[in-house]
Image (cartoon, rainbow, N blue to C red):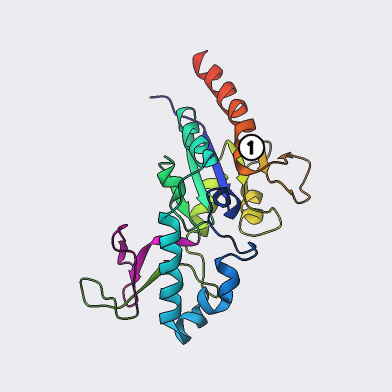
């Protein structure tokens, strides 16, 4: 069986923004209504777990009201030509709903909760059961929390992400600033000489070996898709 080359796609909030998901920087969006350290930090959860549960309930309902966009779908379609691993800072499930089969979530997953006392017990919520409170219990009677990496917590999936990036044959960075970690740090683990593409409507300065595509996620993926499908297809057909 032929081994397909590995394409790693690093994504951030910009890839979901065109679907209507609020980002940190959206003026008038969800994040403007809640101080970030109150709803997305370990201290905030310890102080007021009810507020944190409420915030993530709202975010889940927002997620259910939107659909994957063309960037999500094009990333998934590249699986025809590559083994594609998406490493995302996003907690939404739009990559999965768009068709991607391998997604590593650096910052946790909005549609999941986990036991406070046994963090290895992780549960997936269903669209008809999105809301949790400090009184919510799992099947063992333990309280639960959002399966989210809060500020002030370590990122357990970072090392697995490094190992994947080290094996990449090509990398696409989309919807996350190259000035913001972890994407900026992860790309440094790539093997020298592999193609790296960076899609951003307002790109940060990057080293010359990175190909910059100054466009939105959907526009940039539309430009990049023929480039990433043609060479791989032709080499497979030789």
Residue at the far top: name it: 238
Residue 18: x and y in percent read: 57, 48
Q: Along the horizontal axis of the image, is 119 left or right of 224? A: left
Above or below, 202 against 155 in this view is above
Magenta run includes residue 127: yes
SS for dot 1: helix
- Res 193 quadrant in image: top right
Residue at the far bottom: name it: 47
Above or below, 159 against 230 in this view is below
73 or 113, nearer to the observer = 73
Residue displayed at 64% across by 49% down: 187
Inspect this view and state whether residue 167 appears: no
Above or below, 97 against 124 in this view is above
Name the residue that disc number 1 marks.
219
Q: State which region is magenta.
A: 107-133
- Res 51 quadrant in image: bottom left
């Amino acid at each position: 069986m032929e081994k397909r080359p590995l394409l790693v796609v690093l994504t951030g909030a910009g890839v979901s923004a065109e679907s209507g998901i609020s980002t940190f920087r959206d003026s008038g969006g969800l994040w403007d209504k809640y101080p970030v350290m109150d709803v997305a930090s370990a201290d905030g959860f310890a102080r007021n777990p009810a507020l944190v549960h409420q915030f993530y309930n709202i975010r889940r309902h927002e997620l259910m009201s939107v659909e994957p966009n063309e960037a999500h779908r094009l990333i998934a379609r590249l699986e025809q030509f590559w083994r594609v691993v998406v490493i995302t800072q996003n907690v939404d499930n739009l990559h999965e709903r768009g068709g991607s089969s391998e997604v590593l979530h650096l910052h946790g997953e909005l549609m999941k909760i986990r036991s406070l006392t046994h963090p290895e017990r992780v549960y997936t919520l269903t669209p008809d059961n999105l809301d949790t409170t400090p009184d919510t219990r799992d099947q063992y009677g333990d309280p639960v929390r959002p399966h989210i990496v809060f500020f002030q917590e370590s990122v357990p999936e970072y090392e697995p992400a490094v190992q994947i990036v080290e094996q990449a044959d090509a990398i696409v960075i989309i919807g996350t600033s190259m000035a913001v970690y972890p994407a900026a740090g992860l790309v440094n683990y790539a093997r020298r000489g592999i193609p790296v593409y960076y899609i951003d409507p307002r790109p940060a300065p990057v080293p010359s070996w990175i190909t910059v595509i100054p466009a939105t996620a959907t526009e940039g993926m539309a430009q990049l898709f023929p480039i990433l499908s043609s060479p791989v297809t032709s080499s497979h057909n030789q």
